[in-house]
Amino acid sequence: MRKLTAYLFLLLLVLPIVGDAGAAGRAVHLTAGERKIFLGDGALSVLADPGASLGIDAVADPARAGEFVQLPGNLGAGYGTQAHWLRFTLERPADQPSSWLLEVLPSYLDDLRLYEPDGRGGMRERIAGDLLPFTAREVEYRGFVFKLDVPAGSATYYLRVRTTSTQAAVLHLWQSPYYAAAVQREYLFFGLQSGLLLATALLSLLTWAFIREPLHLYFGGMILLQQCLAATINGFTAQYLFPEGGEVIGMLVGVLGGLNAAVAFFFIDLLLQLPLSHPRTSRVFRLCGLFGLVTALSVPLGLYTYAAAVLIFLSLVTNGALLWLGPWMLRGNGVRGWVNLAAFSLYAVFGGINLVGLLGLGPFHLWMLNGAQLLALIYFLLFNFSIHLRVAEANRLRQQALDEAERERTIRDDQGRFLSMIAHELRTPISVISAALQSLRLFDPAPEEQRLRRYQRIDGSVRRMDAMLQACEAEDRMVTGCWMTDVATVDLRQLTLNLIDEFGDETRRRVHLACPDELPAVQGEAAMLRVVLRNLLDNAIKYAPGSDTIEIVIRAQSESGKAGVSWRISDRGPGLPPEIGERVFEKYYRGGEGSGAPGLGLGLYLSRRIVSKHEGTIAADTACVQGASFVCWLPLKLSESF
């Protein structure tokens, strides 16, 4: 049933609205009591001229009378290059007014030619259209007005319409004394609407200038372009800005129409956040926006008629997509969801009706153009409200995130203070144990093997506890940002020798240091670099066999044209599989978990962060065939922005 309904709906859209072939429009009777007469209620008949080659003599030939088709309403034939001839008959009794005004809208019709009886059995031609300067018009009005002196009796008139825009025409007859007052009311109506919308656009653009939220820029730009387009379509641009413009006005309609459509597509995509929720639909809207830009560029190339028809069809498709997205807009969005639903429903439904009329797939009414301004005012205000709701929600979430970050910072500071206190309290017993161990060794210079192993276990445990405390303190300093506060020149050779001495006699016997006497100093924080070198040396001691040599090579080396120092440590342990060469630098990752080697999994992670902060590099040499090898490179000087 749904498929059948959809099929019938589409069928109604694509069926052209035609009248009875060979039927003449009803004659219009002119009387003093009629101030305004609408000709689109059966008074018009039309003849299509596909090649735009027919002249008035051929059209007015009685033999062609049967080719005219009575229109049930206004002319609405969509886009094309053909011409259309409208025919209507006026009947005026001798005692009724003869002075009438023929108003033709919309204001963007390129070429209008009115043929009226000349009183001698022939036809007199009068030309109008937006290809002519505004100053050439008979009446100063945004649309096109012909002054008629209707003869007594029956008179038949022909109006030839040809335009690169949509083939549409709405005709009214006015009595001259009442026309000026009606125009004043109409201009006031347009002025109030445009003033409110322009004020909204200005406010949105000013908001963007201060907070740099792209949504405000797109919204303000969309309103501004829509108002420029409306002013041009409704004839105000020609009347007040380019009275001598002529062809400029026709080009402006196409350029502004394409740009306005493009910005509207991008705005909708941004407002509904389609890239996050409906990425495929988002791509469709963006492609339609790009085609809007193509349509604007097609104007100077003479291809606007074809591009505009495609753009309007795409707009119809996306309007349907907006209605399809309606239930999703309400899901979890509260008031903003209802506002979006109301705004996009107005935009899609009434915009769709207007587009159907412009394509010639449905009736064309003047209220589609005039009412579009009023509807635009309503849904633009709804869009503006939706934007403010979204910004307010974003500000609320931002403040919530700031509050959570502040709470986290407070907790982290408390943890840091607690850790510092624990580290301070632990260092005292560690120092006592270390001093006691040194005293035992002094009093027992040649211990038995069993006592020696105990001394070594105690010494190793003390060093591990001290290393863990240093790692925790370094992690806390990095998290809180309290580091790189004591930058000075650091002698890596001397720093390495001091570390080796701290590890004791056994380490001194195992480590082979290769370093030139004249080694340039690097710039950095000595305490943090000491953590790096200690971690690398401690890993080599833990994972290398008991008495195997550990090699440390320090030398000057440039990287990417920048002078620096390379520090390499190699052992003869089990080595590192290539697949974990980078993983060992992840937080809490322990490459030797199966070996039972102690550790927190923080050492290499902290080392890389410290070295990166010093603008250096640290990596495992996966090409090493025996044991593990780590290379740390540090620049001689830090940049000013470190």
Image (cartoon, grey):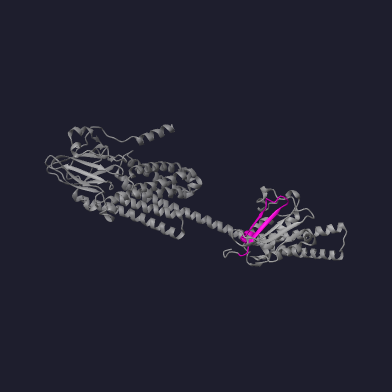
Task: Reply above or below: 335 against 531.
Answer: above
Task: Reply above or below: 319 against 400.
Answer: above
Instruction: Name the quarter where the N terminus is drawn.
Output: top left
Q: Is residue 239 left or right of residue 96?
A: right
Q: Position of residue 445 (x, y in %)?
A: 86, 64
Between 540 and 38, the residue placed more toward the observer is 540
Q: Residue at x 53, y 55 (%)?
A: 397
Magenta segment: does it hold 184?
no
Disc count in the image? 0
Magenta segment: does it hold 633?
yes
Q: Is residue 278 left or right of residue 313?
A: right
Task: Reply above or below: 214 against 320.
Answer: below
Task: Reply above or below: 23 against 236.
Answer: above
Q: Position of residue 97 (x, y in %)?
A: 15, 46
Between 60 and 183, the residue placed more toward the observer is 60
Q: Is residue 103 left or right of residue 582?
A: left
Between 341 and 420, the residue placed more toward the observer is 420
Which quarter of the figure has residue 26? top left
Q: Position of residue 25 (x, y in %)?
A: 22, 36
Q: Residue at x 30, y 39 (%)?
A: 77
| Magenta region, residue range | 611-637
Q: Is residue 153 left or right of residue 426?
A: left
Which quarter of the figure has residue 602? bottom right
Instruction: Name the quarter where the C terminus is drawn.
Output: bottom right
Q: Is residue 425 visible?
A: no
Q: Is residue 578 visible?
A: yes
Which quarter of the figure has residue 555? bottom right
Q: Position of residue 276 (x, y in %)?
A: 51, 47
